[in-house]
Each structure stands twice: as C-alpha cells, then as structure tokens.
Image: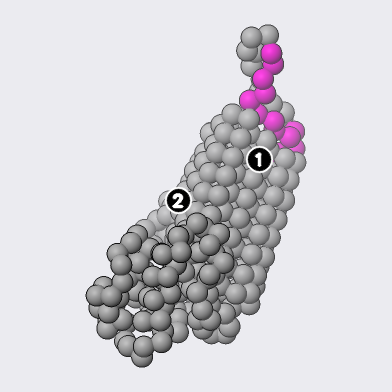
Amino acid sequence: MNMNMKVIESNKVVSLRNIHETAIVHPNAKLGKDVTIGPYAIIGENVELGDGCIVGPHVVIEGWTKIGVGNKFYHGATVGCEPQDLKFKGEKSYLVIGDYNIFRENVTISRGTEGGGGETRIGSHNLFMAYSHVAHDCQVGSYVVLANNSALAGHVTVEDRVVIGGLSGIHQFTKIGKMAMVGGCTKVVKDVPPFVMVDGNPAKVSGINVVGLRRNGLSPEVRDEIKKAYRILYRSNLIISQAIEQMEQELQASMEIDHFIRFLRNSDRGICR
C-alpha cells in the first residue's frame, strides 16, 4: 500500500510524506511533514517521527521511540530495539532522540530498562558512524561523534561535543566529559574528565584536547585555566579531593572550570589517569 499523502496549497501540490510502497508503517505511528521512508523500512506502532526525517532502506524503528525533526537514518539502522540486557522482561521503555542527527549504516540504538530509569536519550546534531552502538539507558548529549564500530555499553553518559574514535568500547556506567576525545581502539573503563584526550587499552590520558577546545570557540583565557586545572589534576601528585580543593582556590571561576570540578566531584568509577 502506497501511503504517500499530498495537500493543495495556493494551487500547488505539496507532499507531506513520501513512503515507498514496500515500506511497512503501522497505522498508529505518528509521522511529521515531509518525511521520507525508503524501501522495506519498518516503522512500529509507538514511533513518533518528526518533520523532515529521512528513513533509508531496510531501516527498522520500533518500540516507544520519539524522534525530533531532520534526522537521517541510513541503510539497515535499527533504532528503538529491545535492550540487550538479561534483566529486561519486555517492560515498556523509551528512546528519545533530538533533532538533526545522522545515523549511518547498521547503527543500533536500544531503548531503556526499568533498572536504568526506563529511557535512552540522545540529543541533537550528533553523528553515529556505521555499525556504532548505543546501549540501553545511555544519555548522549549534542554534537557528539561516534566513529565506525564504536560502542557504548549500558548506562553510559556522553556529554556534549565528545569525539569517540573507531573500534572503541565504553564500559557500562562510565561517563565521558564535555569536549573529551577518545582515540581509536580504546578501552574506557573509568570516567574521562572534560576537555582531555585518552587513548589505549586500558585508556590513559595523553593531554588536553587543544584542537577541540579551539574548534568549539573557547577563549585563550579559558583554555589557559583548563591547562592549569589539568596540571593540578595530573602533574601535582594530589588525590582527586585535594586537586579539587586546589582548583577552587587557584583558578578563575568560569562555566568550564566549574563543570570540570563538578565532574570530578561526581565521578563514581574513578577517572582515567
């Protein structure tokens, strides 16, 4: 059945949806305007798909999944699938996705679980490269890049503007701080503080993400304070509580420094060294 829909506005025919005749779209699914759904795609009963989304061939979007505007899903992506968690017993759980994300070929995104709050959440303007995976109950910010074959285990938090290199694995319950960069083929088992680079197996800190700070428009003054914070944390032989105390005493307050300190204070797994 071809579900293409059109309306007439001021003597012009305007397409509301372009759905391929081989796609399967549940009649209860909620589709926005100017949505394109390709061959053999499947859209489930409880899916909400925002305006201007493009769903490629053989994409599956299922579960209680709410998707914002302008997202693009490439061939074979599976979004809103059941969690890969033995504790999951089919309970109602959610996936919420923001706007203008790109999900490349065969990306997989799981819904949440009851034990993790019931929701996986993804922000806006992210790029998920081919075969990357976001597991249940993850919280992903905005302007994040997951390179090919990288994977987030359950309950991982990734803050804004993080880059995760290809073939990297992030351990469950780990947090990756704002503007951090994870090198390719890296195993992350502890929290990665904001603004730093980590690499290796297991991950070790290799320095500040200087290029990332510049690209994201941080002023020279703020970058200098971040460098001072880095030296206090990694070059002074202080334990984390002592490093935090010294930062609070010596560094100029800013949103970035306050966030750095707050991240350290709230780290549950310890940080990469």
Q: Position of residue 151 (x, y in %)?
A: 58, 68
Task: Check the image and report above or below for 138 versus 97.
Answer: below
In this picture, residue 257 sits left or right of residue 153:
left
Looking at this view, name the residue that lies furthest to the bottom: 237
217 or 52: nearer the viewer: 217
Quadrant containing the N terminus in the rendered view: top right
Q: Main secondary structure of the magenta part?
A: strand
Identify the residue position indicated by label 1 in the image.
54
Quadrant containing the C terminus in the rendered view: bottom left
Q: How is the image coloured?
A: one colour
Give the quarter of the image for residue 181: bottom right
117 or 99: nearer the viewer: 99
Span highlighted in magenta in the image: 12-23
Disc 2 marks a residue whose amino acid type is Tyr
Identify the residue position indicated by label 2 in the image.
94
Disc 1 marks a residue whose amino acid type is Ile
Q: Position of residue 220 (x, y in %)?
A: 46, 64
Q: How many marks?
A: 2
The residue at the point 61 percent across, 35 percent down is: 52
* Nearer-N-terminus badge (1/2): 1
Q: Nearer the viewer, mark 1 or mark 2?
A: 1
Q: Position of residue 191 (x, y in %)?
A: 43, 75
